[in-house]
Image: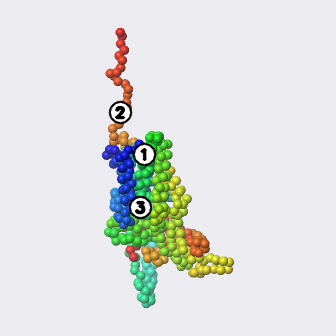
Amino acid sequence: MNRIETISILLAAWLAVAFEVSFNGFRDWFGTQISLLPALMTYVALSSSFSSVVVLALAGGLMQDSFSANPLGLTTLVLALAGLLMRVQRDLVLRDQVYAQVMMGFIASACVPMCVVLALTNTRNPVPLTWHLLGQELVMAVGGALATPFVFYAFKWQSRWFTYQSLPESHYRDTRQIKRTRI
Amino acid sequence: MLRKPHYIAFGLLALAGLIFLSLPESASNRVKLTLTGLFLPLFGLTESTQSVARRAGNAVVPREDLIHELEQLRADKQKLEFNLAQTQEAARENDRLRRLAGYPARLPWKLKPARVIARDPANWWRTAFIDVGSKDGVRLDMPVITPEGLAGRVSAVGTTRSQVVLLGDQNCRVAALVKETSENGVVVPYAADPAIVTLTYLSRGTPVKPGQSIVTSGLELKPGHQVLSSGLGGVFPRGIQIGEIVDVRNVGYGLHQEARVKLAVNLNALDHVWVVAQ
């Protein structure tokens, strides 16, 4: 994990939480706020290093919980679990394909809030499990799924700007050519 | 595949999460309020952007509109001055009568204006952050209101920011009464609709058996009746508007009634609020 990548992930987590706490458009239109952290975790788990998963789960989870009535640390644990599971299976996922990114984003965006709600059922103030909540989860999952390819694109764009590009490999070697001459 | 250092890192992360989870509530709130300090540039930027947009909007308003609005405001001000004079006379009379009856004098509210700077990112909680804190005299459990009615109460206080738990959240229950019938109840969340709360533990006013009726106030609850804070809980002062009744039904095998109440305040559009220092 290089320094630029760590800074980018932390900045993206900050922006994701800032968007969630200050932008009310989705709340007004759909009655639900869309979380971008699961989409970000999908990118990090599939395309980045394990240290990035840990950094994102810790920083993103704590930042999100600081603005929420959730117990501090709950989102960190759930994000870390989601990141670990995706990281373990990353070799089986066609992560460069948009449909794979959308599907993984959908699963992560559905599972993370659902796990938080299930964990909260064991607390002093359990969240009532209603159809309204299920509808909200669905909107969050769809929103997160649609945001995931954009996250991949944004990091690809960032990587193009801040890292060295690999040169295309060629099998042509000038010194290894058979010189055909007249005998 | 994961290697041994990965499992160790994941274990340490899980341990950190569990430590945060096991923090006492006061310490957890302090850490949360400290972490929100990371977003101060965002709050500043939002305020500056809104201020610039407002100034840009003001610059393009036609002069005729401004003059018309000024005249309207002058007329409103005169009406309000007459109302104030009447109210002050009534308040003086009320004070005099309270003194004669031996009741303690009613203290006026001290209102502290605040701006909502952030909302809870989780959809299952209803909390918000405001830009005033202990430095501005805000204390725990102070009521938060808008001109339309009650919004919530202060649940955590930082130096310059506070967390407000809004009506309809699991952690915000209000002792309330129906203005027309004086029935007392408790406002609790209604999970299916964020714009509605439930007023529960209302005494039954409908027949138990044919020909029998047990009523306390003698009046039946109806849609459209106003719901106000009753002041019984000790947190919210009496008489703040909460909303109006949508419908009433019997619950608990007919032991008591509950009413769905449409909130007077649109909690999704909260922008400026007032903290009440009693």
Mark 1 or mark 3, earlier in chain: 3
Q: Residue at x 46, y 70 (%)?
A: B150
Residue A153 position by quadrant: top left
| Element assignment for label 3 | loop
Residue type indicated by callout 1:
Arg
Q: Quadrant of the N terminus of chain A?
A: top left
At mark 2, the secondary structure is loop
User: Dot 1 corresponds to which residue?
Assistant: A87
Q: Residues within 10 Å of mark 1 (few under 14, many from 20)?
A: many
User: Which of the two marks, 1 or 2, is nearer to us in this view?
Assistant: 1
Is residue B221 visible to us here?
Answer: no
Q: Earlier in the sequence, mark 2 or mark 3?
A: 3
Q: Quadrant of the C terminus of chain A?
A: top left
In this rendered view, identify the residue nearer to me: B232 or B271.
B232
The residue labelled by disc 2 is A167
Chain assignment, label 3: A
The number of numbered discs placed on residues in the rendered structure image is 3
Task: Tell me the residue that label 3 is attached to.
Answer: A71
Q: Is residue A117 left or right of residue B160?
A: right
Which amino acid lies under the numbered mark 3 shown in the image of this protein? Pro
Q: Nearer the viewer, residue B47 or A1?
A: A1
